[in-house]
């Protein structure tokens, strides 16, 4: 149950619309962006170079004008500064990384920084996200204190003018207690992966669309945005959960899913932050027989060296 918190849930009439546009043009078909290159990562305290960020953002802006950033620390401020200083045609979903593994003070610092970034870059940050996969049962960084998160959502909404959401897996949003969070946000940030849910490629788009339709039917008064989905270009075959999945991973498989999904998004004007722009070596850990083959490291439409995969050549 949600503990008592100050303030009140949002009336439907008070929800802020998330309608991503740039110069009057819809830009809702976006991409998730992690800036870390091989040998870098947030756990290493890495701050990739200004030159690398500018290269990435120029590359992204050739195809996408909306990106998602996950945490509100120094690297996000640097990204926003690069966008602003170079007048790049990019708008941002700015996140705060909340974690049940972190202290309350650390989580509050993420929220404070999110508020600051949204207010310091009001023309670039068009939406704020309070937490990623913090409620779904399988999350390693699950937040069990709903009341604290509600407090943080209300705090952010009170201090910025942009729409505010929480991004989580469909297996949270399809539970009855998700309505307590839906009542606090301006729109639903949905995440769902056919690959991780043991679907073959031939059924992937149908499953992805069905999940969207199910969550939209549960929250008919909310806009639902697909804030993560995708298909990996590599995977492991071992005794792990990933190793037992039936989906085949590869560049041609990714292209098939991406082409189908991209067409559906554009045709129906579904707000989407496809996962993801670039492969990220730091993700997924380094255990197992072939740790570098893990799917977590291979969701990018570009390789880690920024060469394009087949899907976008």
Image (cartoon, grey):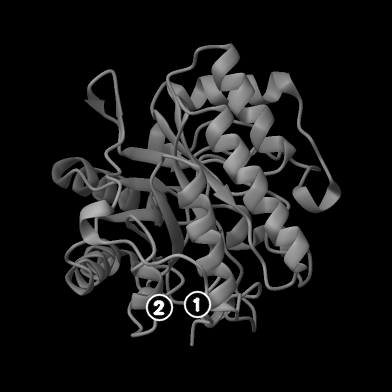
SS for dot 1: loop
Give coordinates of residue 64: x percent, y percent: 39, 30
In the depicted view, which residue is nearer to us: 129 or 239? 129
Image mark for residue 259:
none
Identity of the residue furthest to the top in this view: 86
Q: Residues within 10 Å of mark 1 (few under 14, many from 20)?
A: many
In the displayed structure, 155 sits above or below 194; it is above
Residue 255 shows in this picture? no
Residue 182 is at least partly visible in this image: yes
Quarter containing the C terminus: top left
From the image, tell me which residue sits under label 1: 136
Q: Indicate whether 133 appears above or below 15.
A: below
Q: Are marks 2 and 1 in contact (CB under 8 Å)?
A: yes
Q: Residue at x 52, y 19 (%)?
A: 58
Is the residue 262 above or below the residue 203 in the image? above
Kindly state the secondary structure of the residue where label 2 is placed: helix
Q: Identify the image quadrant of residue 74.
A: top right
Disc 2 target residue: 171
Which residue appears at 55% of the width and 68% of the height? 149
Distance CA(mark 2)–CA(mark 1): 6 Å
Q: Where does the image place residue 62, in percent across and percent down from the top left?
A: 42, 21
Residue drawn at 40 percent across, 67 percent down: 8
């Amino acid at each position: 149950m949600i503990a008592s918190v100050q303030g009140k849930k949002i009336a439907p009439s008070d929800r802020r619309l998330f309608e991503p546009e740039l110069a009057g043009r819809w830009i809702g078909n976006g991409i998730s962006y992690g800036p870390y290159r091989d040998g870098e990562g947030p756990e290493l305290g890495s701050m990739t170079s200004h030159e690398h960020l500018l290269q990435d953002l120029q590359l992204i802006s050739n195809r996408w004008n909306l990106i998602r950033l996950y945490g509100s620390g120094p690297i996000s401020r640097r990204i926003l500064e690069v966008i602003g200083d170079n007048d790049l045609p990019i708008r941002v979903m700015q996140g705060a990384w909340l974690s049940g593994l972190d202290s309350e003070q650390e989580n509050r610092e993420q929220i404070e920084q999110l508020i600051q970034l949204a207010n310091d870059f009001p023309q670039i940050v068009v939406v704020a996200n309070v937490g990623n996969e913090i409620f779904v049962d399988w999350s390693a960084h699950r937040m069990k204190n709903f009341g604290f998160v509600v407090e943080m959502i209300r705090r952010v909404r009170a201090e910025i003018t942009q729409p505010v959401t929480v991004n989580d897996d469909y297996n949270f949003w399809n539970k009855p207690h998700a309505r307590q969070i839906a009542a606090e946000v301006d729109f639903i940030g949905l995440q769902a992966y056919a690959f991780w849910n043991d679907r073959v490629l031939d059924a992937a788009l149908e499953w992805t669309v069905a999940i969207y339709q199910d969550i939209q039917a549960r929250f008919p008064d909310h806009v639902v945005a697909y804030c993560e989905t995708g298909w990996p270009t590599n995977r492991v075959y071992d005794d792990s959960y990933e190793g037992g999945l039936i989906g085949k991973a590869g560049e041609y498989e990714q292209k098939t899913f991406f082409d189908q999904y991209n067409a559906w998004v554009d045709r129906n004007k579904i707000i989407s932050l496809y996962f993801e722009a670039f492969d990220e070596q730091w993700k997924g850990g380094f255990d197992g027989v072939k740790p570098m083959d893990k799917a977590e490291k291979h969701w990018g439409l570009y390789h880690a060296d920024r060469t394009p995969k087949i899907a976008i050549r």
